[in-house]
Image: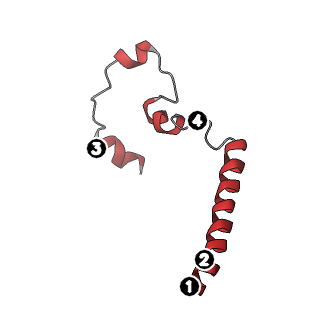
């Protein structure tokens, strides 16, 4: 029974600290934008021109003779 007399104040102090930390986090803006980081993967960082998107990439392979002469 003596343990209960020690545990109740300790649990109350820990609970009070948790509430204080939660209030501090809410005031400092930790919960302002919860979906922004999750949705940022769907947003492009750079905007490409429409012409760049439609132009086919060159499929030309480098010639092995030109590579060996440049060494």
Q: Which mark is residue 64?
A: 3
Label 1 SS: loop
User: Disc 1 or disc 2, which is closer to the eye?
Assistant: 1
Q: Residue at x 32, y 25 (%)?
A: 57
Residue marked by disc 1 = 1
Q: Residue at x 35, y 17 (%)?
A: 55
- Eye-nearest disc, 1 or 3: 1
Instruction: Identify the residue under disc 2.
Output: 7
Q: Is residue 20 left or right of residue 50?
A: right
Question: Residue 54: x percent and y percent?
Answer: 35, 15
In the rendered image, the vertical position of residue 61 relative to residue 1, given as above or below: above
Mark pair 1, 2: CA separation: 10 Å
Q: Which quadrant holds the N terminus?
A: bottom right
Element assignment for label 3: helix
Marks 4 and 3 sit apart, C-alpha to C-alpha, by 53 Å
Looking at the rendered structure, the secondary structure element under dot 2 is helix
Along the horizontal axis of the image, is 51 left or right of 34?
left
Camera-nearest residue between 4 and 24: 4
Q: Which tag, 2 or 3, sits closer to the chain's start?
A: 2
61 vs 58: above or below: below
Tell me if mark 2 has few (under 14), some (14-19) or many (20+) residues whose alpha carbon lies within 10 angstroms of its own: few
Q: Is residue 66 above or below residue 52?
A: below
Disc nearer the start of the sequence (1/2) = 1
Q: Nearer the viewer, mark 2 or mark 4?
A: 2
* Residue 62, position as x, y percentages in the image: 31, 37
**Which of marks 1 and 4 precedes in the sequence?**
1
| Residue behind mark 4 | 33
Cα–Cα span, label 2 and label 4 = 37 Å
Question: What residue lies at 60% left-to-right and 86% top-to-bottom?
Answer: 2
- Residue 34 coordinates in the image, percent (x, y): 54, 38
How far apart in space, not on screen, are marks 2 and 3 (Cα)? 78 Å
């Amino acid at each position: 029974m003596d343990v209960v007399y020690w545990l109740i104040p300790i649990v109350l102090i820990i609970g009070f600290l948790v509430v204080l930390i939660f209030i501090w986090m809410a005031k400092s803006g930790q919960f302002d934008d919860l979906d922004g980081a999750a949705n940022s993967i769907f947003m492009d960082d750079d905007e490409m021109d429409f012409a760049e998107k439609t132009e086919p990439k060159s499929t030309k392979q480098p010639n092995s003779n030109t590579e060996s002469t440049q060494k």
